[in-house]
Amino acid sequence: MPVPVPATDAQLRQVAERAVKVWTDETGRALRDRWTARPGLDQALAAVPEGPRRSWWAGVLRGFADQRTHRFPEAAAPRRAEATGQVLEILRSREPRLTGEDLARPTAAGLEALAALAAATEVGQDLTALSAAVDAELAEFVARAVQLEDLRTSKVTALTALCGPLLARIAQADSFEARIAAADRPALLLAWTGPALAARTAARAAVDIRRVSDKADRALRLLSDAAFPERQQALSAPFDVAADAIGPADAAFSEAWDTLGEAVHIHHVFFRTWEDPALWWAEQFAGVYGYTGLLAMHDLDPYPVQLALRKLDGSQGSSLWARFQEYCPTDSPRQRIADALTELNEDQPRFPGGPM
């Protein structure tokens, strides 16, 4: 039976290098997978409700963890030679010394023992402590993430409750607009509703909770490295600003909407006896000049306005209408439009530039 030949120093060095490489690679990979692979993320964020919010936090945690877990391979790379030397000294001092056969056909237990040697070195202990510190930092990040998500949930709930009455009024305005749009010849009524619907647009922006929530999320993502109080403030700020804006938006919308009933009454009184072609031209007029144009009409008596608009249906109607719009662009003030309507009703309407 052949006598076992002790391994040479060169063979032991190769084994030591391999043991250090395997241990550092596997330890670094395990650290990274705990915090960046999907199973590890789901386990870490189990306290966050499953669904979009957990997925969002998983993305934030992955980005944060990528930076932190990378510290391990950065610290390990320059110390591999040092760790190899420390493992080699242990192998040299062992009795009986490993043989070439041991190294040529290592068992699973033998490979595990070699990895344990790498972990037991001074370098291995330093790197193990670094891995534990990264684990602790990321565990703290997750704990804070759960607290921040709870804060976000409470902010969304509070803002939703605050927006409730205004959202109900906006829904009523939507319904009212839909009824007008479904009516015969809605153009004039829709023009009367212009200010109220503009106020509704501003109010809708004020109660856009999704926009506020997304803004808070962007702030959190940008400040993932910041101290916890700063992140709390960044999360809360968009909700607090939005909450402060609800009252003024509600007041402005309510004021605009309260005038709508009066506007509709004016509409029915002013146009109650109108027929085509004057009514058709009134619709075209409202399409160009909107709410301001209707107010300009209302500043005058209905009958002269009706006669003026009938003139647009005559043989010279296209020319008259073109000259009218040239004199009164769409953003003209109310008084200018009223004056132009009065002039249009003259036998020989005159505007700057000569007769129409």
Image: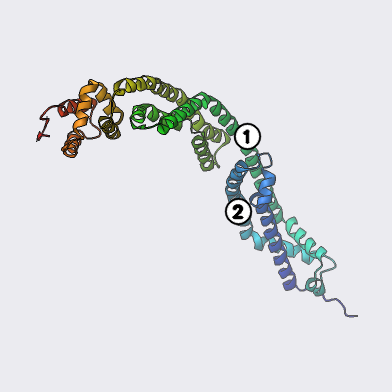
The one of 58 and 304 positioned closer to us in this rendering: 304
Q: Report the disc number at residue 164.
A: none
Sort mark 2 into few (<14), some (14-19) or many (20+) by Cα contacts within 10 Å: some
Residue 14, horizontal then vertical, whole percent: 71, 70
For the residue labelled by badge 2, is the local secondary structure a helix, a strand or a loop? loop
For the residue labelled by badge 1, is the local secondary structure a helix, a strand or a loop? helix
CB-based contact (under 8 Å), mark 1 and mark 2: no
Q: Amino acid at mark 1?
A: Gln
Sort mark 1 into few (<14), some (14-19) or many (20+) by Cα contacts within 10 Å: some
Residue pointed to by mark 1: 147
The one of 207 and 14 positioned closer to us in this rendering: 207
Residue 12, horizontal then vertical, whole percent: 75, 69
The one of 114 and 153 positioned closer to us in this rendering: 153
At x 51%, y 30%, the residue is 239
Decide: is 254 above or below 290: above
Residue pointed to by mark 2: 70
Please give left or right for residue 17 compared with residue 95 in the image: left
The one of 227 and 307 positioned closer to us in this rendering: 307
Residue 50, horizontal then vertical, whole percent: 66, 42
Please give left or right for residue 348 compared with residue 308 in the image: left
Q: Earlier in the sequence, mark 1 or mark 2?
A: 2
